[in-house]
Image (cartoon, helix red, strand yellow):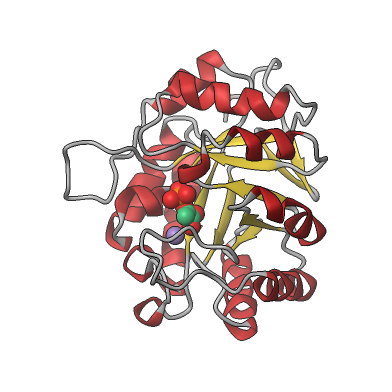
Amino acid sequence: KEVKKEYTTVDVSGVQFGGEEITVIAGPCAVESEEQIVKSAQYVKAAGAKMLRGGAFKPRTSPYSFQGLGEEGLKYLSQAREETGLPFTTEVVNPRDVDLVYKYTDMFQVGARNIQNFALLTLLGQTDKPVLLKRGMATTIDEFLMAAEYILSEGNKNVVLCERGIRTFETATRNTLDISCIPVVKERSHLPIIIDPSHAAGHWHYVPALSKAAIAVGADGLIVEVHPDPENALSDGAQSLNPDEFIKMMGQIRTVALSV
Ligand code: PEP
Ligand code: MN
C-alpha cells in the first residue's frame, strides 16, 4: 500500500504499523483461561496474524458482566507470547493499573470509553511503550486526533489509531464503521490507523466485508476478535470469528491488499 515519507511507522516488539504491510492483530475479546488464550494465539498466528489481542481488564457495559481476570490474565497473555512469539496488546482501563500492565504488555490499548480520559492518556504518554488508541463511539475525528496529542505531547511518539465504529441512528450493526475516518486521518495525521471491524459490526458475519473495505480504503491494519469457541465466549462471542472463518477472511484480505 501507499506509504508517504512523512508518515510515521510504529514498531511494536518487531511488528510494524504504518509500513507497506497490512498488520493484523487478532484474538479473543477477553482472556478467559490460559488454555483459551494460548490456543487463540496458535490459531491466529497460523492464519497470519502478527499480534495477539485479549482483555484482562474489561470495561463492560454492565458491572455484573465478566470484568476480566486482571493480572492473572496478563500472565496468561505472556504465556501465549512465550509459546508463539506473538507480541500482544491489552487494554488498560484505570490509570492506577498503568504500571502493572506495563510490566507485561507490548502495547497498551486504550478503549473507546476512555478516549478522553486525559489523566490516563497523559500517564501513557510518559511511558515508552506503544499505545493503540481507539476512537470513542461519540468522538469527532478532531477530538480523536487531539486525544492522541495528549500522548504524543508527553513524549511517547508511538501511537497507533483505531477506528472501531461510532454511534448513529442505525441499529442493524452494533456501531457504524466510519470508513471515511481513514482517508481523513491519512490527510490530517502522520499516525498509522487500523480498523476494528468486530466492535463496529457486532456480528461476526459482517466482519470480513468490513475488513475488506478497511484495507481497500487505506487502513494500515486490523484488530479482529477471534475465539476458539465463540458460542461459549464470556464476552463478545456474537462478533467473534471462529478460527476457520478467520483463516478464510485472511485469504480474502490478502487479495484486496494486493490491489491497494
Ligand atoms: C475491546 O477491544 O475489547 C473493546 C472493549 O473495544 P472498544 O473499546 O472499542 O469498545
Ligand atoms: Mn470486545
Q: Is residue 249 left or right of residue 44?
A: left
The residue at 61%/31% (across/down) is 192
Q: How many marks?
A: 0
Residue 135, compared with residue 241, is above or below; it is above
Residue in the foreground of this view, choosing between 35 and 115: 115
Residue 71, by quadrant, is bottom right
The residue at 43%/37% (across/down) is 136
Q: Quadrant of ligand 2?
A: bottom left
Q: Is residue 235 left or right of residue 119?
A: left
Residue 120, by quadrant, is top right
Residue 186 in sight: yes
The residue at 56%/37% (across/down) is 117
Residue 60, compared with residue 3, is above or below; it is below
The residue at 60%/66% (across/down) is 56
- Residue 108, position as x, y percentages in the image: 67, 49
- Residue 59, position as x, y percentages in the image: 48, 58
Q: Quick one: which residue is furthest to the bottom in this view? A: 35
Residue 20 in sight: no
Can you say which quadrant of the picture contains the N terminus?
top right
- Residue 82, position as x, y percentages in the image: 79, 72
